Amino acid sequence: MKLVKLISCIVLGFLIFGCEDALVKSTDSSRNLEDFEAAWLRVNEVYPLLEFKKINWDSLYIVYRQRMEMARGDEFYFVLHDLLAELKDGHVYYHTDGGGEVYPFYPQRHFKDRHAYSPFVVRKYFDKELRLTESGSAEYEITPENIGYVFLSDFHGNYISGEFQNIIEYLKNTKGLIIDIRQKRGGDYQNVLTIVSWFLIDPLEPPKLYFLGELIEQSPIEPSEIFTYTNPVVVLINGSTFSAGEITTEILKQLPNITAVGDTTGGGGVASNSSPPKAVGKYQLPSGKLIYIGTGYVERYDGQPFEWIGIPPDIRVEQTEMDIKNGRDKQLEYAINMLM
């Protein structure tokens, strides 16, 4: 019996001390420090708005280098997370081992407005079911007041490029149009151009785009050759409108028949490019871990980057989570009344 107890103690001791590495990976200080140095240097070399945001990246190196020296195993990610959060950039992310993308920062305006919109409340302003595109990227219909409405939920892929023509042709005889871009994050620039083209009479210069400090030449945005919607348009935005949704809003705001209503957007104006290689956003650290750091940015037409500061509405109509809980969409109501 004593022998059995002894063996049990030995096995138990092995499990207790041997499992330590399963719970917290063994220390690899040199590799963690290599990854930290590479991440800090990548930001220092390519991130375009350190000066604009008044971020002292050199002083942060000292603080986070000390933390990284103390980091053990996967504690690396806690330090990397906090370091990248200092950029205050909603596009920046990193990959965990075997996991997905982790975004260290979200704009406060997003948190303020993320529950201040509901598709279920929107539906109360219609006397019929909204139509849904095949991809599910957009909903649209006509209100009882003969006002067109389209909610854009996804700028990714080529869905909008392929489906927006059917939407605008269905809505083209309305006396006004509402484009709802609330609760939108990111997407393909080609989809932005597709949407904007249906509202242009003449070619329009796009917002300025910079990569690695260089202004990128862009062709004017051309009007659609099929149809132009010239009746009054309201674009609904809020703090969760982000990235491609913001670019769409900023371009449409330049047109005389279009008004942006709601609240200031989230401020996601940093971008990356496929060439030259240094302008690619995804970057592999020495260990193989991936981070994404933007290498360029888009300017508003007033010359300010919309990163961090967002796109302000032409008419501010604030809306709260309590409004939604009470069954009211004040921003949508304002747009309908404005277009009647």
Image: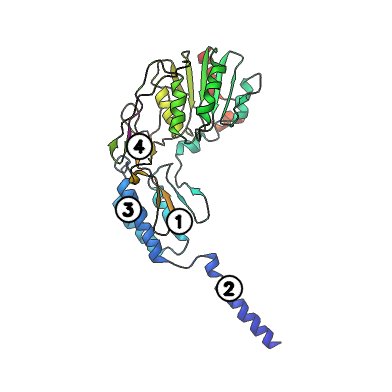
Amino acid type, residue under disc 4 in the picture: Tyr
Q: Quadrant of residue 249?
A: top left
Q: Is residue 319 visible?
A: no
Disc 1, SS = helix
The image shows residue 287 at horizontal and vertical percentages of 42, 59
Report which residue position mark 1 lands on. 78
Distance of mark 4 from mark 2, alpha carbons? 51 Å
The span picked out in magenta is 205-209
Of callouts 4 and 1, the N-terminal one? 1
Callout 1 touching callout 2 (CB < 8 Å): no
Mark 4 or 1, closer to the camera: 4
Of callouts 4 and 2, the N-terminal one? 2
Distance of mark 1 from mark 2, alpha carbons? 25 Å
Callout 4 touching callout 3 (CB < 8 Å): no
Report which residue position mark 2 lands on. 16
Of callouts 4 and 3, the N-terminal one? 3
Report which residue position mark 3 lands on. 41
Near mark 3 (Cα within 10 A), the count class, few <14, some 14-19 or many ≥20, is: some
Distance of mark 2 from mark 3, alpha carbons? 39 Å
| Most frequent secondary structure within the magenta stretch | loop
Of callouts 1 and 2, the N-terminal one? 2
